Amino acid sequence: MKKILISREMPAAVMARAHELFDVTLRNSTDPMTEAEMRSSLVLYDGMIPTLGDMFSEKIFAEFGRPKCKILANFGVGYNHINVEAARNHGVTVTNTPGAVTDATADIGMMLLLMSARRAAEGDRYVRAGKWVGWSPTQMLGSHVTGKTVGIIGMGRIGQAIARRCHFGFGMEVRYFNRSEKDVNFPATQVATLEDLAASVDFLVAATPGGAETTHLVGARVFAAMLPTAHFVNISRGEVVDEAALLTALQEGSIAGAGLDVYENEPDVPEAFFALDNVTLLPHLGTATEEVRSAMGMMTLDNLEAFFSGQTPPNAL
């Protein structure tokens, strides 16, 4: 029976199946794996299920020729925390869990868009603090969403799922910025530059993959181009956004608000955000439903099972 390490506990049904298939070791921590843990695990196990924060960099693989561990079955669609080329060079296959996360992440994107526009988090804090004394015509006026214009940064599975919700659910005009042309089955206009997109929309949503190519893709120039009435939403990866530039834009009121589910140095969130009423902060809830997390876990096991039976894993990178 193959020995595998699971870096963080997964839903009960996934853990039960894992124990049926493999000799399982489960870490007893929710913190990211340390460098020492990652190196020792490459020696001790036949395969691993790492997840967000487990930084398998080139440095981690550098001291190995061909480690015992032959597969990293990543729990998550994003894999920018794993240097896939370095893994491949050392005989390690990397897989991910695409598809399962699309709708749940898109739902969170829409929730953040609506919460930011309608000042929902601020309103919740207001009521809990006992400050609400009754309805008035000018109380906590926010931004209308229906019929407005949304800009999507990254028109992959998740970007398209958000765009569909905006178009079909809220009658919004959809514009997008993407490195390549996309053939989509709903009205959407591709914009040539990110700054042009930012300048022409009421809501700007980042849904692009993370990694070196997109680090700080959204920075001071993008926020400067946005309308002062516009809102920004990030459900991609934290490093896609220059957090300091976003903080400045919110503090100065050069944009109306923001909704964030991811952060540049998770789980650390700059304390300056906590003092602002024009930002909604979530603890990386993008895929946090029982159904989705279970589906993701089962996909990692499918990848491991296929690999160890000599087949190509269904989600090999």
Image (cartoon, rainbow, N blue to C red):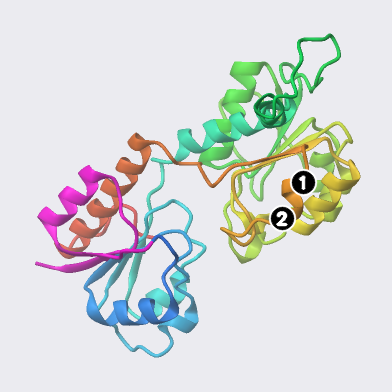
Q: Name the residue under label 1.
A: 275
Task: Answer left or right for 226 relative to 150.
Answer: right
Assess whether residue 16 is covered by the magenta stretch: yes
Give neighbour class at mark 2: few <14, some 14-19, many 20+ (Cα, 10 Å).
Answer: few
Near-viewer residue (98 or 140):
140
Residue 200 visible? The answer is: yes
Give neighbour class at mark 1: few <14, some 14-19, many 20+ (Cα, 10 Å).
Answer: few
**Residue at screen point 73% across, 20% down:** 145
Which residues are the magenta region? 1-29
Q: What residue type is labelled 2?
A: Glu
Secondary element at tag 2: helix
Residue 27: x percent and y percent?
30, 65
Q: Looking at the figure, which quarter contains the C terminus? A: bottom left
| Above/below status of 265 relative to 173 | below
- The residues tagged by marks 2 and 1 sit, at their Cα atoms, a distance apart of 7 Å
Residue 188 visible? The answer is: no
Q: Name the residue under label 2.
A: 271
